[in-house]
Amino acid sequence: MCLSVPAQVIEIGDKEHAIVDYGDGTQRKVNVTLVDAKIGDYVLVHAGFAIQTIDEKEARATIDIFKEMMEG
């Protein structure tokens, strides 16, 4: 089973990388060569690669579920 996590693109670096925020202030550099993402877009991240763009409503709902799971 594979897990992808939603994150918001907050900075575009070069053509291959962007900085994303996972919704809790955690920021990471990810490869964006598989998607056409812009600042503000939400993407699904798996193994350091943005593999798909998703709409904001879906991303926020998933982030909220992850937060609930982490709280207990």
Image (cartoon, rainbow, N blue to C red):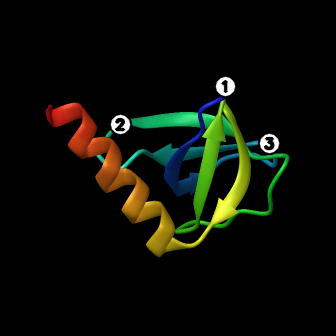
Give the x, y percent position of residue 25. 29, 43
Residue indicated by mark 1: 1
Q: Is 47 displayed left or right of 70 in the figure?
A: right
Mark 3 residue element: loop
Q: Is 27 displayed left or right of 50 in the figure?
A: left
Give the x, y percent position of residue 58. 49, 67
User: CA gap, disc 1 to disc 3?
Assistant: 26 Å
Q: Quadrant of residue 26?
A: top left
Residue indicated by mark 2: 26
Mark 2 residue element: loop
As shown in the figure, which amino acid type bears the numbered disc 2?
A: Thr
As shown in the figure, which amino acid type bears the numbered disc 3?
A: Glu
Dividing the image into 4 quarters, which one contains the N terminus?
A: top right
As shown in the figure, which amino acid type bears the numbered disc 1?
A: Met
User: CA gap, disc 1 to disc 2?
Assistant: 24 Å
Residue indicated by mark 3: 16
Give the x, y percent position of residue 28. 50, 34
Circles 3 and 2 in contact, beta carbons < 8 Å? no
* Disc 2 packing (10 Å; few <14; some 14–19; many ≥20): few
- Camera-side residue of 55 and 48: 55
